[in-house]
Image (cartoon, helix red, strand yellow):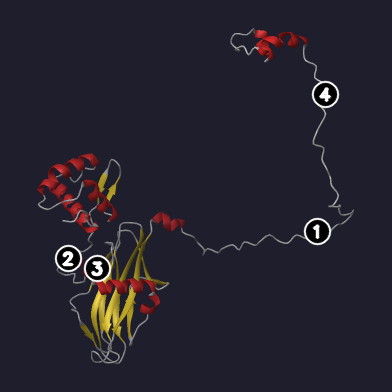
Amino acid sequence: MPSKFSCQQLRKTGQGFEDFLVAQGLDMETDREQLRAIYNRDFKTSCATRTPGFSSMLHGMKIANLAYVTKTQVRFFKLNRWAADVWSPEKRKMKQGSEISTHHKSLLAKIFHDRAEYLHGKHGVDVEVEGPHEARDGQLLIHLDLNRKEVLTLRLRNGGTQPVTLTHLFPLCRTPQFAFYDGDQELPCPLGPGECYELQVHCQTSFVGDFPATVLWELLGPGEPGSEGADTFYIARFLAAVAHSPLAAQLKPTTPYKRKQITGNPVVTTRIEEGQRPDRAKGYDLELSMDLGTYHPPSRLRQLLPILRQGTSIFTVPKEIVEIK
C-alpha cells in the first residue's frame, strides 16, 4: 500500500465525506474541529479501505476547487455537473488523461514546446471551430460569464481527396470547467473526402480565472499501412476558458497598453555667455578651522568644581549643582 495518496484519491475521499455529511444531516456544519472529529470518529471507521488524514483530504479538496478552507472554517462546494447526460460515465466515451500511454505522454510534452507545427492541417485535414471564441496566439479563448454554459464545436474535416483514419482523440484537461462529448462515434473512425468528426466542448465555471485545455487528434495518413504517406500525423487545438468577475469587467483597460519609451540622459552642452572659464588646475582650499572666542565661566562654577569631579549621583547632590549640570 503506498504511503502517500494522489490528488485524485484525496478528492474522491473528500467527496465521499461530503456525501456522508449529507446522509447524516450534517452538511451545514462548517466548524473545522467539529468536522475533524466527525471525520476521524465516524467516517474513517465506516470506510473499508485506507483513508488519508483529515488535513490531507482538505488539501486535495482545496486544490480541486471543491472546498474553501480557513484555520477555523471549512465549506464544501458541490460540483456543478451542468447536465447529467453530458457528464454521466455511460455517455461520456472520451478517453481520460490517466489512460494515455507513455508514448503519448512524451508526445504531448513535445507538442507543448512546438505548438505551431500541430496547429496547421495535414493531407487536407483541418479543424473547423463553431461557437463563441476568440483566436489569439494559437489559442482558442472562450470568454465565460460566471455560471453560464458555452458550447464549442470542433469539427475535424477531411478536405483532401484521399481517405484518412482517426485513430485516437485525447481531450486533456485537469479542471472540471470542461466537458468533452463525441456522441456515438466510435474510434478508429475512417474519414472519407468531405466527411467530418465532431467533438463538442462544454464550458462552464463558477470561479474567476483562466482554465486551459488541449485536444489532440491522432490520424493515419492516406495510403496502405506501411506505404509512403500512411504515416501517423497529429493535429492539436489549445483551448482556454477565461472567466472574469463583473468588477474586473468594469476595471478593464479601455485602450491597449503602450509602453513609454525611456530615453537616456541627453547630452548637455554648455556655452559661456560672459566671463571666463575657471582654472581647474588652481586649487580653491576652504578654511577647515575657526577660532572660538574666550568663554568666561560663572564664578560659582569654580567653587563647585571639586564636587562635580567626585561623580556624585544626581539624586544626592545639592540642587544648585544639578542646575549647573
Q: Which amino acid does label 4 sit on?
A: Gly
Of label 2 and label 1, which has the lower sequence position?
Answer: 2
Local crowd size for mark 3, using a 10 Å CA cut-off: few (<14), some (14–19), many (≥20) = few
Residue at the spot 36% in from the left edge and 78% down from the top edge:
118
Label 4 secondary element: loop
Q: Relative to 180, does residue 279 appear above or below in the rendering?
A: above
Mark 2 lies on residue: 88
Q: Which of 130 and 287 is in front in this view?
A: 287
Give the CA distance from mark 2 to mark 1: 81 Å
Label 2 secondary element: loop
Marks 4 and 3 close (CB-CB < 8 Å): no
Q: Nearer the viewer, residue 58 or 3?
A: 3
Of label 4 and label 1, which has the lower sequence position?
Answer: 1
- Residue 324: x percent and y percent? 69, 13
- Residue 206: x percent and y percent? 30, 57
Please identify the quarter of the rendering in which residue 195 is found. Answer: bottom left
Mark 3 lies on residue: 97
Mark 1 lies on residue: 270
Q: Name the front one of labels 2 and 4.
A: 4
Of label 2 and label 4, which has the lower sequence position?
Answer: 2
Please identify the quarter of the rendering in which residue 207 is found. Answer: bottom left
Residue at the spot 43% in from the left edge and 72% down from the top edge:
137
Q: Which amino acid does label 1 sit on?
A: Thr
Mark 4 lies on residue: 293
- Residue 298: x percent and y percent? 77, 12
Whether residue 18 sits left or right of residue 139 in the image: it is: left
Q: What residue type is labelled 3?
A: Gly
Q: Quadrant of the C terminus?
A: top right
Of label 2 and label 3, which has the lower sequence position?
Answer: 2
Marks 2 and 1 close (CB-CB < 8 Å): no
Give the CA distance from mark 2 to mark 4: 101 Å
